[in-house]
Amino acid sequence: MTNKPVALDIQHGGKPGSWSDRGAQAPRDPRDRTRDQDTLPPVATPWALEFPWELNVTRRYAIACAARLEQLGIPCVLLCDGSYSDRWHRVNTYNPGCYIACHVNSGAAGTTDYGRVFHWPGSVTGEALAHRIVLEVLGAYTWLPWAWTAEAAPSDRVKNTIRGVNAPGLCFEPGFLDGKEGRDWFQDESNLVL
């Protein structure tokens, strides 16, 4: 077993010049995607109060993941501030075994729910690690609300989350917040350790 740390980067938050970036906001009432969200009455559920932003859920699952990895004897480094290039520079000085840009999604209108682990195109180690993580996730749960795949980062938007790291870099996007399945999935504490 390696003693190199796993670097988990809680993205969307802590960027200079955009401190208020929390990612997309899940609709307060996922059943109503047509009305202006500001005019909707609050939904009396823990979801509406605790998880309105991508950053909230990403932070919770990254911290839960780090705790679980450390229980297994794998050291972790959590990052949550600085520009992405500043974070990559710091990560490269830590020489981690891998770097994971942690994300969740919102705003897909329930039409493209998925769990994906993206790796840098052409990275053999990154591709193998992405596939291994997907297999571990699929083996850990008896039911998943959406399909999971590992694939090469398809666009600059995804590549820009892992562009500057020397270690195998992955962009981890476990699902969407605005579909009923996603909402229910992320509300269950046992699902946070992916």
Image (cartoon, rainbow, N blue to C red):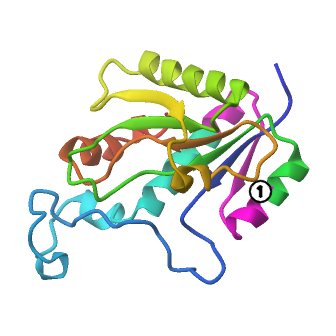
Residue 70 within the magenta-colored segment of the rendering = yes
Residue 162, how many percent across, how many down? Answer: 66, 49
Is 145 or 170 nearer to us in this picture?
170
Q: What stretch is highlighted in magenta?
A: 67-88
- Give left or right: position of 127 versus 26: right
Is 68 or 147 nearer to us in this picture?
147
Q: Residues within 10 Å of mark 1 (few under 14, many from 20)?
A: many
Q: On the image, numbered disc 1 is attached to which residue?
A: 88
Please report the residue visible at 37 percent of the width from the left and 66 percent of the height from the top.
Answer: 24
Q: Is residue 48 above or below residue 35?
A: above
Total labels drawn: 1
Q: Is residue 126 above or below residue 111?
A: above
Residue 93, how many percent across, how many down? Answer: 90, 52
- Give left or right: position of 40 versus 53: left
Residue 189, how many percent across, how many down? Answer: 40, 41
Q: Is residue 156 above or below residue 172?
A: below
Q: In which quarter of the image is the N terminus?
A: top right
Residue 91, how many percent across, how many down? Answer: 81, 52
Please report the residue visible at 75 percent of the width from the left and 61 percent of the height from the top.
Answer: 87
Please report the residue visible at 50 percent of the width from the left and 24 percent of the height from the top.
Answer: 134
Residue 83 within the magenta-colored segment of the rendering = yes
> Dot 1: what SS?
helix
The residue furthest right is 93
- Choose top left, top right, bottom left or bottom right for residue 156: bottom right
Type of amino acid under label 1:
Trp
Please report the residue visible at 45 percent of the width from the left and 15 percent of the height from the top.
Answer: 139
- Give left or right: position of 80 versus 183: right
